[in-house]
Image (cartoon, grey):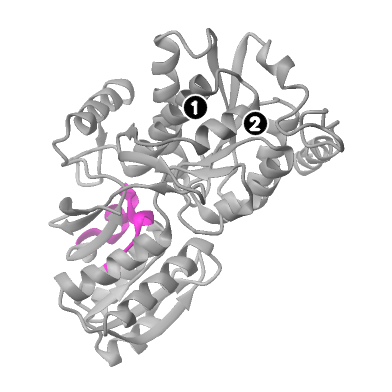
């Protein structure tokens, strides 16, 4: 019965009347019904996130950050004299559910903007629907370059993979003095494939040699065959651009096989689960990220204080206190930026909001100053963190 009900809902959404503002034939950009939306008691913002499923910590953290931002905006009086109403859908960490969620938010809830997703594969699944309906979408954390190439209504508040992958390759060569690397990539994950590509290119451009590029897919639990091949080639670093569950398992098995070189990764490592699964095996690892909780900047420390006052402090598997992760910060920045864009637009019309987002320059986010460039990507700094003694420590900040 559950399956039938779900199918029925999907069909209802798929064939629901588009409304003259949702990209219907002959509709003006931004929607003729936007005036009706502007007259509603609240300004509706949609969110789709992985609140459950294999990457649930991403969605849960970003949702808390976004919710905190919207609550602060509303407590200060809202925007345009109205409260922002946040409508959230769980995409269960599945691309097909992400698309269904965005269709529901646009067609049934008539939101004026959509925020989501952290994972590039899910953003890529949903973005065409937002673009088709001419409803602006901001991804808090999808770093694959293809996401914003879907269309001129699609934005992000995070850096992109050419910068992230290139930064980690440069760090490996210049800071760790590595000349030989191996890569282990999730071949069915757009984020992982893209990040690996940019790491490999920059590493080779800097004179390094890629000894091996082995693969796996999300959900795998045994990586010993790939790791055994890599061990025989004796790399000086191993780049693993995957999500936290597999990263923890790979680290455990790599150390068991005697691979003791530094492990490198991207922002998808930023989850308490990386340490919970990887334990001591993830020590001597480095990953790029959007912020460091150790940053003494008052903006960062003020965010951490407000987050912990709202949601409480989080304890890790070892009982130590954990700071909010980067997904929470990115969700917060996305929420504050969309509220600011609506205010600058002076209207809840989706087209006007789109133009205001595109005009964003020097927005003061917790993750740094955010400027939206011509490709609708955020230009902002990146940080490199090290896992040492089961603690995540700041290494360096790199400006774009």
Residue 372, image x and y in percent? 44, 43
Q: Is residue 118 left or right of residue 368?
A: right
Q: Is residue 84 above or below residue 5?
A: above
Q: Residue at x 33, y 67 (%)?
A: 166
The numbered dot on residue 53 is none
Q: Is residue 172 left or right of residue 265?
A: left
Q: Which quadrant of the figure has residue 348?
A: top right
Q: Residue at x 64, y 52 (%)?
A: 125
> Callout 2 environment at 10 Å: few (<14), some (14 to 19), or many (20+)?
many
Q: Residue at x 69, y 17 (%)?
A: 37
Q: Nearer the viewer, residue 192 or 254?
A: 192
Q: Which residue bears the numbered disc 2?
A: 351
Q: Residue at x 23, y 59 (%)?
A: 279
Q: Is residue 357 magenta?
A: no
Residue 386, image x and y in percent? 18, 58
Q: Which residue bears the numbered disc 1?
A: 341
Q: Is residue 109 left or right of residue 169?
A: right
Q: Which quadrant of the figure has residue 200?
A: bottom left
* CB under 8 Å between discs 2 and 1: no
Q: Is residue 65 above or below residue 38?
A: below
Residue 190, image x and y in percent? 53, 63
Quadrant for the C terminus, please: bottom left
Q: Main secondary structure of the magenta part?
A: helix
Q: For the residue labelled by badge 1, is the local secondary structure a helix, a strand or a loop? A: helix
Q: What residue span does the magenta drawing correspond to?
A: 264-280
Q: Is residue 21 above or below residue 347?
A: below
- Outermost residue to the bottom: 232
Q: Is residue 265 magenta?
A: yes
> Callout 1 environment at 10 Å: few (<14), some (14 to 19), or many (20+)?
many
Q: For the residue labelled by badge 2, is the local secondary structure a helix, a strand or a loop? A: helix
Per the model, the C-alpha gap separating discs 2 and 1 is: 11 Å
Visible in this render: residue 122?
no
């Amino acid at each position: 019965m559950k399956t039938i009900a779900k199918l029925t809902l999907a069909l209802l959404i798929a064939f629901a009347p588009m409304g003259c503002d949702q990209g219907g034939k002959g509709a003006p950009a931004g929607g003729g019904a936007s005036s009706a939306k502007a007259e509603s008691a609240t300004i509706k913002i949609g969110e789709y996130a992985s609140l459950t499923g294999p990457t649930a910590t991403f969605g849960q953290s970003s949702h808390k950050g976004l919710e905190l931002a919207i609550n602060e905006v509303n407590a200060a009086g809202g925007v345009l004299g109205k409260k922002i109403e946040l409508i959230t859908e769980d995409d269960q960490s599945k691309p097909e559910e992400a698309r269904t969620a965005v269709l529901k938010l646009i067609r049934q809830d008539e939101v004026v903007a959509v925020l989501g997703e952290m994972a590039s594969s899910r953003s890529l699944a949903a973005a065409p629907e937002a673009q088709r309906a001419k409803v602006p979408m901001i991804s808090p954390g999808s770093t694959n370059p293809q996401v914003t190439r879907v269309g001129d209504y699609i934005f992000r508040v995070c850096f992109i993979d050419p910068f992230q992958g290139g930064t980690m390759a440069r760090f490996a060569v210049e800071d760790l003095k590595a000349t030989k690397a191996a890569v282990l990539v999730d071949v069915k994950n757009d984020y992982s494939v893209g990040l690996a590509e940019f790491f490999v290119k920059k590493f080779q451009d800097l004179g390094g040699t890629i000894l091996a590029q082995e693969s796996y897919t999300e959900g795998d639990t045994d990586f010993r065959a790939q790791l055994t091949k890599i061990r025989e080639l004796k790399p000086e670093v191993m780049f693993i651009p995957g999500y936290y569950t597999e990263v923890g398992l790979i680290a455990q098995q790599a150390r068991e096989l005697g691979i003791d070189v530094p492990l490198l990764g991207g922002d998808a490592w930023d989850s308490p689960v990386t340490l919970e699964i990887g334990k001591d095996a993830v020590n001597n690892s480095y990953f790029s990220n959007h912020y460091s909780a150790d940053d003494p900047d008052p903006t960062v420390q003020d965010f951490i204080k407000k987050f912990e006052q709202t949601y409480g402090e989080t304890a890790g598997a070892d009982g130590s206190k954990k700071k909010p992760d980067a997904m929470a910060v990115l969700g917060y920045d996305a929420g504050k930026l969309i509220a600011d864009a609506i205010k600058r637009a002076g209207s809840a019309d989706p087209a006007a909001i789109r133009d205001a987002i595109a005009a964003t320059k020097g927005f003061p986010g917790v993750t740094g100053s955010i400027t939206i460039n011509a490709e609708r990507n955020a230009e902002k700094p990146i940080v490199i963190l090290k896992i040492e003694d089961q603690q995540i420590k700041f290494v360096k900040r790199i400006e774009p």
